[in-house]
Amino acid sequence: MPLYSTACPLPINRKIFRHKGSVSPIPTTGLSLWLKADAGVSKFSFNYVSQIIISGTSTPNLNGTYTATSVPSYDFGNGIPSNYSFSGPSNGFGMYFDGGYFYMLKNIGDGDAILESSNGQTWTITSQAVNQVVISGFTGDYAGANGSYNYSSDYNAFLNGDETYVIEGSELKNIETQEVLATNTNTNYSGSWTLVNGTGNPVTTSVIIIPTGSISGSTTTSTVNTNFVTAWADQSGIGNNAGIESYAQEPTFVSSFLNGKPAVEFNGQGQVMKIEDEDSLDFLNMSCFIVLKYLGEGTGNNIVYMKNADDGSPENPSVYGMVGTLGIFGGNLDWPVSSAGNPWPDLDSNINITDGTPRLLSMTYNGTDIITYDAGVQTSSNELGGNMLTSTGLLQIGGYNHSFDSAEYFYGQIAEIIMYNRAVNGTERQQVEAYLNTKYAIY
């Protein structure tokens, strides 16, 4: 038997939803929770840069429009898009984007980064954006070192025309003997070079770079919409809204569950939603109505929903109160509530939902008897006695992961859940069941 609780990194908006200008199709007295997949479901979406335009560089073939070649995939681990690439004009340059929201324009052929930007608007040159160094002023034995040094990715260095000399880092050296002729302390290779041996006329340097001040850019963003559910707003008017603790726990929105109506699907492997503990969820008596469909074996006892204290455990059942925990035990639904008369009940509802057909299930507890219904037909009645025990834990939908140092999850679809803080009478129960059956055409 299971239970639970939590702390949520994602805020849950407790905005109150009210039925304005219309009569509620169900009784509203004591209505404490009303989740329905056709209202109040929020789904995850994210924006990404789909196009970058660069202009104003002194290297004209860097200018142009760079378009994302693939839409970034959603990373459940850290909640940000994963790497994706851009293709540029047919000039050999392309761009990539990493999860740190950082852009680099690079040469597709050799992978050398040319420009970088944190926002796609302002671009700065990288060290390899210096593509030519011109040296003059050497005489005598060093006269051959004068000339234009062009960057070569094959050597990761600057070579002069006949490749007799090379600039590697801050050193000018003979490419064959590796003798160092001169050094330069400036990282952009400008300024004077200092001879290592001998004397010579003053050495001057000029570099050809992409001027930072002339580089501009613009970005275009696009939006990716997903079916991952991040929030489910309570329609009771109280504001017991459901949210998630982490992106990995998002269930999936299913647009067509039954009779053209949607549902929220839980995978039975960790997808679960939570509702913060509120006095309105501390029931003494209760009624619950749920429309669902079993899809297969989840984790443990396929817990559909549960509310427990943070420290609820088999060793200390008196500290928890279950809001009609609903799970599948031995193939049949077990729909217990913890009461003063029986804090640890094990009740078989005589309902088997493992055939995978959509079901409309109902339950009432009046302080003495818990009665269950399948499609409006009574299936069980068990005497418990006493008011339900209240709890300080979360109400979790789709399973639980905050009790017993374990977790159990439901694999299936939930279209609607309605809870009251009292036992509705027979006429009221039939009214709710009629509303749900008309909507979903279950029987």
Image (cartoon, rainbow, N blue to C red):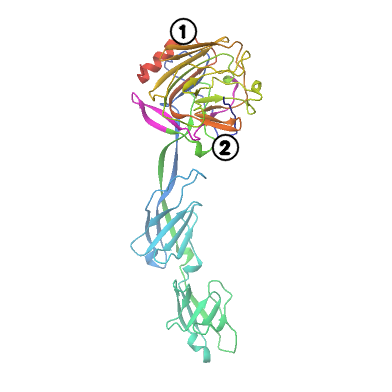
Q: Residues within 10 Å of mark 1 (few under 14, many from 20)?
A: few
- Residue 75 is labelled as none
Q: Quadrant of residue 352?
A: top left
Q: Tell me what residue is drawn at x 46 percent, y 10 percent.
A: 428
User: Residue lying farthest front?
Assistant: 330
Q: Which residues are magenta?
A: 253-279
Residue 4 drawn above or below residue 288:
below
Residue 313 position, x and y percent, is: 63, 26
Q: Quadrant of residue 61?
A: bottom left
Q: Nearer the viewer, residue 342 or 267?
A: 342
Q: Nearer the viewer, residue 434 or 45?
A: 434
Q: Tell me what residue is drawn at x 62 percent, y 19 percent.
A: 390
Q: Residues within 10 Å of mark 2 (few under 14, many from 20)?
A: few
Q: Nearer the viewer, residue 71 or 400?
A: 400
Residue 422 position, x and y percent, is: 54, 12
Hey, what amino acid is under mark 2? Pro
Q: Secondary structure at mark 2?
A: loop
Residue 70 position, x and y percent, is: 38, 51
Residue 121 position, x and y percent, is: 46, 55
Q: Is residue 254 found inside the magenta-colored segment of the image? A: yes
Residue 251 visible in the shown view: yes
- Sequence-first tag of 1 and 2: 2
Residue 120 visible in the shown view: no
Mark nearer the viewer, 1 or 2? 1
Hey, what amino acid is under mark 1? Gly
- Residue 426 is labelled as 1
In the picture of the structure, the residue carrying the numbered disc 2 is 9
Residue 442 drawn above or below residue 68:
above
